């Protein structure tokens, strides 16, 4: 069978970027008719297609029961086509084809949450990215086939809401208690952006007038009781629409924009054209029920999905290897949006913290891959931190280098050239280059190779010549699959400070421009280079990689005193924070003294709490055990890390002394007008409360209990709950019971209840057993699974002991029921090979025993990669 029109699927199931070929047929239009019944769903489709290149007509389809197929008016018999588990192939099709098919599918028993599925008794939704549409009907289900969709949805009237993409053209009754709607989406789109919703939901309505004067109806659909929790998302949506007009010149292009919330969702959310479908965790936001962090996440995911309308939908990906084209750019855009919502420094800190905690370890282990991979078995396995977060960093580097004006000229050119097209990473970089007039082509290297570069820097002051020299060297760890690793362009944002006064030196007067230092950013694009600053009258303190200007591992021999200096005097909030992290890592892993850190914090805090309480709270971030473990490549002993970290927290608590209680008492979030500031104050209070408990101050438990009882704010309540539960306070049992009673009907809050218990440092196999056999534990709801599994993984000592079996059992169960989630959860164990013996061999044996028991491409590919070290 000739299957060359799709990237070739070889016997070993690996798909390669180099094998990309254009589809042989394009689809001009598709008419879909979806009729939902209790025990099956009928899907009729009419595709109008025309030939583009030679080759067979290939329609992808999975788990479809084919009832009839008619080509240009003639019913086909089984000898007219070949059909296997993945596709229907018609050889020698004419150049113009109208193809009608009828299939039966079973959303009511679809547990994989991909394609059309029943999310709850009241609700059917779709998730088609990347390859779910082929589970709805036979179709060339690939992103480079763009078509106009008309959709008819029919169901029982017990589901009053019937939605699809585009404009509502018609609605009516069909008799027998059923009704229908017909929708038309005027914009051509790939099938992964198709969505429909059938359900019993309430709606929050609003409107937005675009810069072009278009009046857009905005609707957020959720369960009736959750509608009051949709206002923050609605405001964020309007804000996003305006932000994209202002910053990228991109107005919205349809007359309506709908968002539907469901609790049964594998990921965060999905940008279907005009009809986003969201995990409830990314749309419901309310002080009383969700934490500050969750509220921030809702706003950023709303923006993310909205921004996809231009970066993803209007301009889409040619093939799934280009996933980071839309995701890397859209994450960069949502991060920039969020920088306007809160302390910009803290947004950057949080984004880099995620990058370092997830992407760096991923990129240094067996699952490492380039931001644009060149092969995969299961594309669902590549919705990774590398594609999303490192992808965002590549865009940030180019934007840093170009500056605001030129970056905008570049993006304008991208939209001008490629609107309505399915394109590649090369197209993006070429458009940025053409629009800005700056050659960025060497940034393609970042997209094409794996690994986190190491950036070694050395500083040398010459008192006689009054010069300061900085030399740089970059390197990458050898990778068996990528033998020709090249140097990458690394923008190094830097500043020099006068050690005596704490003042920043002006590079303008001090720098040698021939070295390419411009606007405080040096572009280091060779293996080695040295730059020199002149007129430096005393040995300066240098601050490198400000705002984390490149996703690299920096090695620079700051002295502890210089780091303390930067905590106090650096004006870039991110590098202020980075200095605390570097210092804390040394105290933790290399046994340096803690005093110098505490001194610096005490000097910095009073002013900072006034100015930016959120940033102040972040200066107390102590690297987590998980992060510390990920920095260790062999002989890793989780218990040793736990002990060292505990010792540090105890020392800090002791040395901070009365400061904690005083600070706690002095802070009042009610006095803050802005959410970001109040959030900072709440974070600081929770940190102080925790430190007091660490000091063995039993009044801390009373204060925590009081805070728990007297607040209507989830961050305050949760902060207090954690202090009580994780320290086994006498009140712990009562507050847990109280929390359950208050929130048992509120799934997202109840997730927190599961999480807090699973994340207890002294949790045992039995704790997990009790939680997973609780009446409210539900293996059909990914959020609930993640609450327990994620909570457990907060303590690597637990992950790597009784947790191993937990993750393996889950992967085995989900392999069949929900392989997307199963594959992800298994990745928690991907750094098994770094463990010290005997744990290393034990975990390896457990993983090997799992191998013959799993069938899905998702879990098998992940497991094979994990075991390939
Ligand atoms: N495009 C979505 C987003 O980033 C994610 C969809 C991922 N879905 C999946 N099944 N892997 O917003
Ligand atoms: Zn996205």
Image (cartoon, helix red, strand yellow):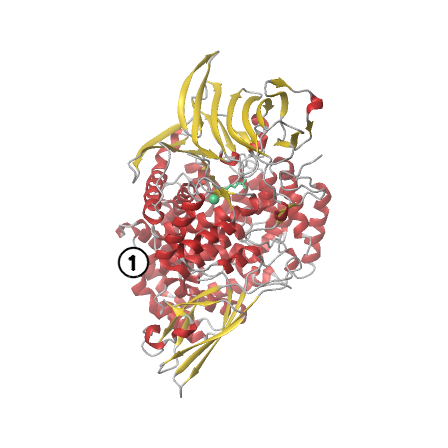
Q: Secondary structure at mark 1?
A: helix
**Residue drawn at (44%, 37%) of the image:** 280
| Rendered view: 278 above or below 384 | above
**Residue drawn at (71%, 44%) of the image:** 12
Most foreground residue, 747 or 165: 165
Most foreground residue, 459 or 428: 428
Does the closest atom of ligand 1 sit within 8 Å of the Cβ of label 1?
no
In the picture provided, is 668 more to the left or to the right than 786?
A: left
Q: Which residue is mark 1?
A: 666
At which x and y percent is residue 860? 67, 44
At which x and y percent is residue 558? 46, 74
Residue 753 in view (yes/no): no
Residue that sits furthest to the top in the current view? 175
At which x and y percent is residue 758? 53, 47
**Residue drawn at (44%, 58%) of the image:** 398
All told, the count of numbered labels is 1
Residue 755 in view (yes/no): yes
In the picture provided, is 540 more to the left or to the right than 148?
A: left
Label 1 environment density (alpha carbons within 10 Å; few <14, some 14–19, many ≥20)? few
Most foreground residue, 37 or 588: 37
Quarter of the image with the C terminus in it:
bottom right
| Rendered view: 217 above or below 630 | above
| Rendered view: 597 above or below 465 | above
Quarter of the image with the N terminus in it:
top right
At which x and y percent is residue 515? 43, 73
């Amino acid at each position: 069978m000739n299957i060359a029109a799709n990237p070739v699927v070889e016997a070993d199931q690996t798909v390669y970027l180099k094998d990309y070929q254009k589809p042989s047929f394009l689809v001009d239009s598709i008419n879909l008719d979806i009729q939902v019944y209790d025990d099956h769903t009928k899907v009729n489709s009419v595709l109008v297609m025309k030939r583009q290149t030679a080759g067979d007509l290939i329609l992808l389809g999975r788990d479809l029961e084919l009832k009839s197929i008619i080509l240009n008016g003639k019913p086909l018999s089984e000898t007219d086509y070949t059909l296997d588990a993945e596709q229907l192939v018609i050889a020698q099709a004419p150049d113009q084809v109208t193809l009608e098919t009828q299939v039966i599918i079973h959303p009511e028993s679809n547990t994989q949450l991909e394609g059309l599925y029943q999310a709850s008794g009241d609700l059917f939704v779709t998730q088609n990215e990347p390859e779910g549409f082929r589970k709805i009907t036979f179709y060339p289900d690939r992103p480079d086939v763009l078509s106009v969709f008309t959709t008819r949805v029919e169901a029982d009237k017990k589901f009053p809401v019937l939605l699809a993409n585009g404009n509502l053209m018609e609605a009516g009754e069909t008799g027998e208690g059923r009704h229908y709607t017909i929708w038309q989406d005027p914009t051509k789109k790939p099938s992964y952006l198709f969505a429909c919703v059938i359900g019993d939901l309430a709606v929050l309505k609003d409107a937005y007038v675009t810069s072009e004067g278009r009046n857009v109806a905005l609707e957020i659909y959720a369960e009736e009781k959750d509608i009051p929790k949709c206002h923050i998302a609605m405001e964020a949506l309007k804000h996003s629409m305006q932000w994209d007009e202002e910053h990228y010149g991109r107005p919205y292009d349809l007359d309506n924009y709908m968002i539907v919330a469901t609790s049964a969702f594998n990921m965060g959310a999905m940008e279907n054209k005009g009809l986003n479908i969201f995990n409830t965790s990314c749309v419901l936001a309310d002080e009383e029920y969700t934490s500050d962090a969750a509220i921030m996440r809702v706003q950023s995911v709303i923006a993310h999905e909205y921004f996809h309308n231009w970066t993803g939908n209007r301009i889409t990906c040619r093939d799934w290897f280009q996933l980071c084209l839309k995701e890397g750019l859209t994450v960069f855009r949502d991060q920039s949006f969020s920088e306007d919502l809160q302390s910009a420094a803290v947004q950057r800190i949080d984004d880099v913290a995620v990058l370092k905690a997830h992407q760096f370890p991923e990129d240094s282990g067996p699952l490492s891959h380039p931001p644009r991979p060149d092969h995969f078995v299961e594309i669902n396995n590549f919705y990774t931190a590398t594609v999303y977060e490192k992808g965002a960093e590549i865009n940030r580097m180019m934007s840093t280098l170009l500056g605001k004006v030129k970056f905008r000229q570049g993006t304008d050119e991208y939209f001008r050239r490629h609107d309505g097209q399915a394109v590649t990473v090369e197209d993006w970089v070429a458009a940025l280059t053409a629009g800005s007039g700056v050659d960025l082509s060497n940034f393609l290297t970042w997209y094409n190779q794996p690994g986190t570069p190491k950036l070694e820097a050395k500083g040398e002051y010459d008192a006689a010549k009054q010069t300061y020299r900085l030399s740089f060297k970059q390197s990458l760890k050898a990778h068996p699959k990528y033998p020709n690793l090249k140097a990458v362009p690394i923008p190094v944002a830097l500043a020099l400070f006068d050690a005596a006064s704490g003042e920043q030196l002006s590079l303008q007067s001090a720098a040698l421009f021939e070295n390419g230092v411009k606007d405080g950013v040096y572009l280091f694009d060779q293996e080695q280079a040295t730059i020199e600053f002149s007129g430096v009258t005393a040995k300066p303190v240098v601050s490198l990689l400000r705002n984390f200007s490149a996703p690299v591992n920096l090695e620079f021999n700051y002295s502890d005193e210089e780091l303390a200096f930067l905590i106090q005097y650096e004006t870039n909030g991110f590098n202020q924070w980075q200095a605390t992290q570097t210092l804390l890592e040394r105290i933790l892993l290399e046994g340096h003294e803690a005093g110098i850190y505490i001194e610096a914090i005490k000097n910095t805090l009073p002013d900072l709490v006034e100015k930016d309480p959120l940033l102040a709270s972040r200066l107390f971030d102590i690297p987590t055990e998980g992060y510390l473990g990920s920095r260790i490549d062999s002989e890793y002993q989780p218990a040793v890390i736990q002990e060292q970290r505990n010792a540090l927290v105890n020392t800090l608590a002791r040395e901070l002394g009365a400061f904690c209680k005083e600070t706690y008492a002095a802070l009042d979030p009610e006095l803050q007008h802005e959410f970001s500031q109040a959030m900072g104050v709440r974070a600081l209070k929770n940190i102080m409360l925790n430190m007091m408990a660490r000091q063995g101050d039993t009044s801390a438990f009373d204060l925590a209990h009081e805070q728990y009882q007297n607040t209507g704010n989830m961050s305050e309540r949760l902060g207090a709950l954690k202090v009580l539960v994780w320290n086994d306070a006498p009140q712990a049992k009562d507050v847990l019971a109280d929390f359950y009673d208050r929130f048992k009907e509120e799934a997202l809050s109840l997730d927190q209840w599961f999480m807090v218990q699973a994340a207890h440092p002294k949790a045992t196999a039995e704790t997990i057993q009790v939680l997973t056999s609780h009446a409210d534990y539900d293996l059909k709801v990914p959020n609930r699974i993640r609450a327990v599994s994620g909570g457990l993984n907060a303590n690597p000592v637990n992950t790597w002991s009784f947790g191993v079996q937990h993750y393996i059992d889950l992967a085995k169960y989900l392999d069949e029921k929900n392989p997307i989630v199963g594959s992800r959860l298994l990745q928690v164990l991907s750094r098994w090979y770094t463990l010290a013996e005997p744990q290393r061999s034990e975990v390896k044996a457990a993983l090997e025993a799992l191998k013959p028991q799993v069938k899905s491409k998702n879990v098998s590919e992940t497991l094979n990669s994990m075991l390939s070290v």
